[in-house]
Structure formats: structure tokens, C-alpha cells
Image (tube, grey):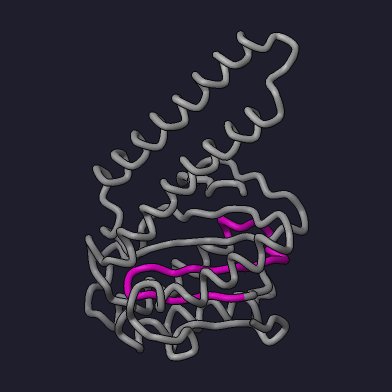
Amino acid sequence: MESPRFYKRNLPHWQPEGVTFAVQFCLTGCLPRHVVLALQADRDRKLSEVNSTRIKYAEQYPNGIPDELEEQLNSDYRAAKNQYNGKFDEILDGESYGPNWLIDPKVAKIVADALHYAEDELKSCHIWAYCIMPNHVHLILSNVNPVLHKVLASVKIYSARIANQYLNRTGNQFWHRESYDRIIRNKKEFDNQITYVVNNPVKAGLVSDWQEWRFTYLNDQYSI
């Protein structure tokens, strides 16, 4: 599974045609810089250990690393990245930092309306599922037009403006500037991501069944 790519503002974006994305974005202040840097340092240390082991094996087996060792290296590499991703989710689900404006149904509806407007009116994507948590949003979408970062920017700019008006904080930053996304590469991963998104409120202890969370959406074309 490909780990999320961290896109900074003003950098070029590359998007293969016909792909499906799993996306996460959060409110401003929910991922402080010192927390992000600490998690990145821990991830990089573990990935460096895997790379060092790979170099050692390459020297030990000049004719090629045995399949079982190669498989273990790949597994360790994925585990390090998945652990990194999982810690982000733990921080957001635990509402460890920052605001939780999205717990307000009126604010959550503003975001939901912006997502559906992008799909239904702008025809800029096809939404498979989303979940609006108290401080972040999980989203799965395909048929993205023209490119993902522009679609997300449109949703975030519009929803931020309307939400800030409602919250009497016009002119202040609403969303964390960057979003996190990964390309979903096969049906199994797609099913896993759908299940993860709709069950996020259950995992966070907010409800006992995913259908109880008001701002979870699952497209009628998909059934669990």
C-alpha cells in the first residue's frame, strides 16, 4: 500500500489518470508542527534501519537477496509507514490538539454541502465515501477533475469562508494548510479504505455503529 504523500503548497502535483484517492484533511492547529516533525523523525529512523539492513543483505548475497528476506524487508518498510500514518489518526481521533468545530452539526453540514457541490454541480469528482469527524475529514473519491489539490482547495476555501462566518471568526485560518492523500491501487485496498472511513467514529468511541454517525456518507453504488 502506498503511504500518503504530503503535498506542500505551491509544489507541482502529479496525478495519474483514472485513479481513486483516499484523502484526509484536518482543522488548523490539530497537527502542530513539533508533533509532525517528531513523528516524521521516528518514521525516518525506522525506514533508515530497514535500508541499512537491505544494504547488509545486498553485500551478503551478491547474487540477489533471497525472496523471504526481501519480503521481510518490504513488510518492515510498510509497517514503519503504516505506524506513522496510524499515529496521525490517533492524535486526531483523540482530539489531542486544536479545535473541534466540526462537532457542531451546522459546521459539519457546511463541509458536507461543499463536498456534494463539488461532485454534483462542479462535476469535479465522484465521491465514494466520507466521514466528517470533530476535527478532520476522511474522503474517498475518483474521477477527479482537473487535479486533486485544486478540487480540495475549492472545497476547503468555500467551507472555510462559510464556517468562519457562522463561527464569528471571519479572516482566520480554518483548515490545516496541507492535506494527506494516497492512491488506492486495487479492489482489496479500496474495500479496506471504505471500511476504515465509515468506521472511524466507531474506532474513536463516538458511536457503536457506523450508521449512527450523522456525517458519514457512503455512495449508493457501494454496499457494506
x then y, percent, for residue 18: 77, 58
x then y, percent, for residue 119: 64, 77
Q: Going by the image, does 137 lie left or right of 185?
A: left
Quadrant in the rendering for residue 38: top left
Quadrant in the rendering for residue 191: bottom right
x then y, percent, for residue 181: 54, 54
Q: Is residue 102 above or below residue 50?
A: below
Quadrant in the rendering for residue 64: top right
Is residue 134 covered in magenta?
yes
State the residue in front, 89 or 141: 89
Labels in figure, total:
0
Q: Going by the image, does 8 lie left or right of 148?
A: left
State the residue in front, 191 or 102: 191
Residue at 53% x, 61% y is: 23
Quarter of the rendering occupied by the C terminus? bottom right
Residue at 23% x, 73% y is: 169
Q: Is residue 61 above or below residue 150?
A: above
Residue at 39% x, 86% y is: 208
State the residue in front, 24 or 200: 200
Residue at 70% x, 9% y is: 62
Is residue 97 covered in magenta?
no
Residue bounds of the magenta highlight: 129-150
Q: Going by the image, does 115 lie left or right of 85?
A: right
x then y, percent, for residue 132: 43, 76
